[in-house]
Image (cartoon, rainbow, N blue to C red):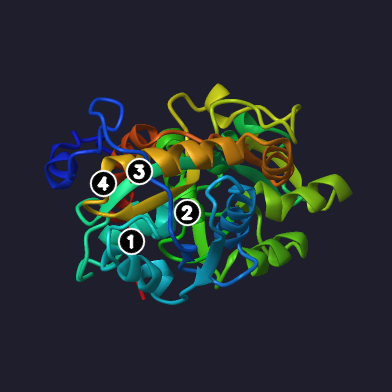
């Protein structure tokens, strides 16, 4: 059973948050272009989110440039920013994978995702949707649980690979619902969805952006969403927690600066990012992609990271996942 241990260890590693609201500090503005580093290729969810926010940051007086430093599950980009000067001109666009899970998948990393970064803003939260092939004789989450209990190990679930958020969303469901699936890892979510549509899999916990067109076409059947509230794009699909109490699995995108970035810089960027996320163009695009725009503060980002740090440690232990 997953033990939501206290986050004392994580808190001990964490630098003190820049308390810009508590201490007076001179106003700050960048004096050259700002870089948003993304550890993944252009076109993915992290990159897309980074570019939406960057395009919305029109009030800084300097352009915001997205720079892709790809490799090692995002660790190359993260390490680059961890070693960058804390002068307000370089940030990492982070995910729950890069800034919680990787710490446990890659125990020999040369940096620490809490100690070596300063939270700036929680940009968005995203959930997944549990979708099944129409041939599976289940219409909702309760029927999926009953079917899986009657057929232990006979429900094949595809994921984006070992150590992916899809695997962890499924593992948490198995633990909470007391069922057992057969995990079929793929090299990404797209091939898993392709095999689900083809009937070679029974179930996938898919990001909404990857599943929506297939839900609309009837090629897959949605059963429940992993957030605790309904998603605007799927108003008739209930949260899994309505049937499986205590189940919740969220992903997120956030902005981090190098550790020791001054409080006035963090405050300026946090405020600017929040304003960008709340503009109709950015907000509506994020919503259309199945995300919940947040534009949260540095403290919001720190709290979410610390919570998920403990959860992901337990899920990595439970699944035995290791980074490649």
What residue is pinned by disc 1?
A: 102
Q: Which mark is residue 262?
A: 4
What residue is pinned by disc 3?
A: 266
Front one among 257 and 73: 257
For the point 25% across and 32% down, the residue is 19
Residue 253, image x and y in percent? Answer: 49, 48
- Side (left or right) of 148 relative to 10: right
The quadrant the C terminus occupies is bottom left
Q: Closer to the camera: disc 2 or disc 3?
A: 3
Front one among 47 and 297: 297
Q: Secondary structure at mark 4?
A: loop
Is residue 258 visible to us here? Answer: yes
Residue 42, image x and y in percent? Answer: 61, 70
- Side (left or right) of 149 relative to 137: left
- Side (left or right) of 183 relative to 84: right
* Spatial CA span between label 4 and label 3: 7 Å
What residue is pinned by disc 2?
A: 165
Residue 76, image x and y in percent? Answer: 37, 74
Q: Are marks 4 and 3 in contact (CB under 8 Å)?
A: yes
The mark nearer the N terminus, 2 or 3, is 2
Name, please, the residue furthest toward the right: 217
For the point 56% across and 72% down, the residue is 41
The mark nearer the N terminus, 3 or 1, is 1
Q: Closer to the camera: disc 2 or disc 4?
A: 4
Rate crowding at label 4 as few (under 14), some (14 to 19) or many (20 or more) other CA atoms within 10 Å. many
Residue 28, image x and y in percent? Answer: 38, 45
* Spatial CA span between label 2 and label 3: 28 Å
Q: Closer to the camera: disc 3 or disc 1?
A: 3
Rate crowding at label 1 as few (under 14), some (14 to 19) or many (20 or more) other CA atoms within 10 Å. many
* Spatial CA span between label 4 and label 1: 26 Å
């Amino acid at each position: 059973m997953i033990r939501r241990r206290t986050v004392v260890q994580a808190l001990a590693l964490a630098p003190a948050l820049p308390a810009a609201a508590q201490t007076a500090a001179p106003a700050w503005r960048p004096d050259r272009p700002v870089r948003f580093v993304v550890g993944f290729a252009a076109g993915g969810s992290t990159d897309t989110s980074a570019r939406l926010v960057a395009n919305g940051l029109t009030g800084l007086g300097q352009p915001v440039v997205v720079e892709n430093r790809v490799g090692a599950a995002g660790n190359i980009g993260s390490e680059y920013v961890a070693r960058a000067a804390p002068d307000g001109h370089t940030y990492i666009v982070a995910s729950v994978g890069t800034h919680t899970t990787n710490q446990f998948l890659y125990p020999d990393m040369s940096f620490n995702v809490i100690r070596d970064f300063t939270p700036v803003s929680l940009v968005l939260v995203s959930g997944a949707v549990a979708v099944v092939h129409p041939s599976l004789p289940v219409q909702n989450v309760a029927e999926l649980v009953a079917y899986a209990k009657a057929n232990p190990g006979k429900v094949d679930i595809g994921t984006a690979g070992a150590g992916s958020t899809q695997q962890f969303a499924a593992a948490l469901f198995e633990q909470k619902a007391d069922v057992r699936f057969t995990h079929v890892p793929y090299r990404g979510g797209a091939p898993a969805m392709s095999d689900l549509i083809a009937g070679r899999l029974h179930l996938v916990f898919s990001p909404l952006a990857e599943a929506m067109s297939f839900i609309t076409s009837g090629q897959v059947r949605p059963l429940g969403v992993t957030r605790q509230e309904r998603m605007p794009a799927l108003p008739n699909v209930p949260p899994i927690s309505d049937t499986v109490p205590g189940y919740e699995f969220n992903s997120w995108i956030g902005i981090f600066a190098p550790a020791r970035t001054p409080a006035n810089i963090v405050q300026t960027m946090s405020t600017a990012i929040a304003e960008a996320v709340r503009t109709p163009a950015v907000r509506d695009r994020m919503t259309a992609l199945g995300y919940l725009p947040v534009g949260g503060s540095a403290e919001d980002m720190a709290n979410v990271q610390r919570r998920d740090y403990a959860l992901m440690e337990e899920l990595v232990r439970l699944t035995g996942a290791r980074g490649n």
